[in-house]
Amino acid sequence: MALLLWGLRMVRIGISEGWGGEIRGVLGASLNNRFKALLSGLGVTMLLQSSSATALLTSSFTGQGILTTATALAIMLGADVGTTLVAQILTFDFSVLSPLLIAFGVALFTYSPGGRRRDVGRMLLGLGMMLLALKLIVAASLPMRESLIIQQIFVALGEDLLLAVVFGAIIAWASHSSLATVLLIITLASTNALDITVAFTFVLGANIGSAIPPFIATLSDNRAARQPPLGNLLIRICGVIVTLPFVGLIATELSLFQIDNARQIANFHMLFNLALVIVFFPLIDRMVAVTEKLIPEDDTSSDMMLPRDLDRGAFETPLVALLNAEREVLRMGEVVERMLRNTFIALKKNDTELAWQTREMDEMVNAFYDGVKRYLTALARETLGEKESKRCNEILGFATNLEHIGDIISDDLIQNILQKKLATRSKMSLQDREDINSLYQPVLASFQLSLSVFTSGDITMARSLLARKYKFTKREKKAVLNHLQKIRDDHDYDSGLSAMQLDVLRDLKRIHSHLAAVAYPILEEAGQLRSPLRRSKSGEDPPLRRIEDSVNPTTT
């Protein structure tokens, strides 16, 4: 059983590392088309061989606002059907291919320089291990037919079908794989060690158990991310409640087709999930309404903004682990953005208490950063592909920039306000307020755009972010020149306010540069960065700086 689970993990890692970007694109492109979402969930799960991994990916997209809850539920319904198709395929005896797949997979994985050929080798190796494990389970389960203890256990479970459902759910939950559980049940039944009715009941339990890990993993997430796993779990439970009383009748009817036990179990598993799709697909909106009633609104208090533990159990699927880190960095960005907004409210209203509260929020930002850094460092110790390693560095780089912005707000902006503005109670001129506001508003707009660029990697948005940086630099220079001219004309202008004005303008520029840094890796990979010594022939576009600017954005 352990070898079967490890083989599943190898296949999942090979697929996610080799085609992780495409998988994310397929799920993200589902948007609000539910039929397309259903097919996307089916196809992705057949590749990943894990409906739990698909559910976690989908919940992450829902939590970020990329998918609606209804679309996410459609994806999960398709994902559950996808696992049944994989089980159908693996019920055929491919054990003769196991040595060939293992040997070829090891050779391809070991001697490939990298890239997708190495990922294909890992995938073939995992598939060979799965086939070998199934063969070993068959051999190990043969003596179970003669064991009085095992027979008594199965008889007891046959008399208490509800207990059999719970038993199957526990196995699927513990293994985090309904596919592995169903394959184990099929293997036991093929040796006549397990009665077909009890096997069907175990399958029902496995369908519930596979929906539990995503539900537990998202308990600390926002409301949008928790709704799809809860809805999927409720759908499974409702399906089992309706089907359980008729298991004996279903077993009798399927036996009339005179097919072997393994095929009967695989067919029952598939028919059960297809029935759920037929019944609940038209009722998705009602299920969304039910989850909205069961899950309370998100608490927007500061306690809800505290960093949460990142699930290291997701390391077996690096794509899911990276999405966990992305989600935590986005929450970190929300805290930093709130700090920026509070700072300028304090500046405008002379609010000393708010300034101190904002400064204390930097400790929260540091806690987020430390948690993400430790999580990604531990993930980097795992076997990651080139794309996953690159994305890992990008996430950590953006988190570092957010942490620097928090330090700028706390150590520079807030410090200037407390020492020079609030201490003297001097009033800024209307022109100075307008100059600061003309830079503050673009920074807020670029903040949201940078988060979108970080999440999507969209080239068009990345170019827009750099274009905003160029315009911002021109505005900042103009504001500084206006202020210097005002000092020359007004000899009585307060020197403390003047110093604060220039510091605020400088700090806003530094913050904007940190935000724009996320665009450079995207444009460099797309080949859209130009040398700073060349301009376009039309002269309309500014020269885009090289990627080195993102290492030390304060110098740009």
Image: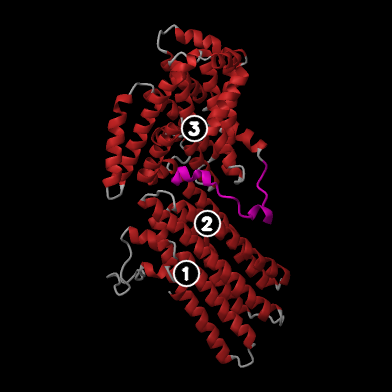
- The amino acid on which the numbered mark 2 sits, given as a three-letter code, is Arg
Q: Earlier in the sequence, mark 1 or mark 2?
A: 2
Magenta stretch: give its range. Answer: 296-319
Q: Nearer the viewer, residue 296 or 159?
A: 159
Magenta stretch holds residue 136: no
Q: CA distance from mark 1 to mark 2?
A: 26 Å
Mark 1: amino acid: Ser
* Callout 1 secondary element: helix
Q: What residue is shown at x 66% (from left), y 73% (from top)? A: 347
The label nearer to you, 1 versus 2, is 2
Q: Is residue 458 visible?
A: no
What is the three-letter code of the residue carrying label 3?
Answer: Ser
Quadrant showing the C terminus: bottom left
Q: CA distance from mark 1 to mark 3?
A: 45 Å
Q: Secondary structure at mark 2?
A: helix
Q: Is residue 415 left or right of residue 540?
A: right
* Residue denoted by label 1: 513
Q: Earlier in the sequence, mark 1 or mark 3?
A: 3
Classify mark 2: residues with Cα within 10 Å, few (<14), some (14-19) or many (20+). Answer: few
Q: Residue at x 57, y 76 (%)?
A: 504
Report the number of discs.
3
Q: Which residue is mark 3?
A: 177
Which of pointers 1 and 3 indicates the residue nearer the eye?
A: 3
**On screen, 15 above or below 161?**
below
Q: Which residue is mark 2?
A: 374
Q: CA distance from mark 3 to mark 2?
A: 27 Å
Q: Earlier in the sequence, mark 3 or mark 2?
A: 3
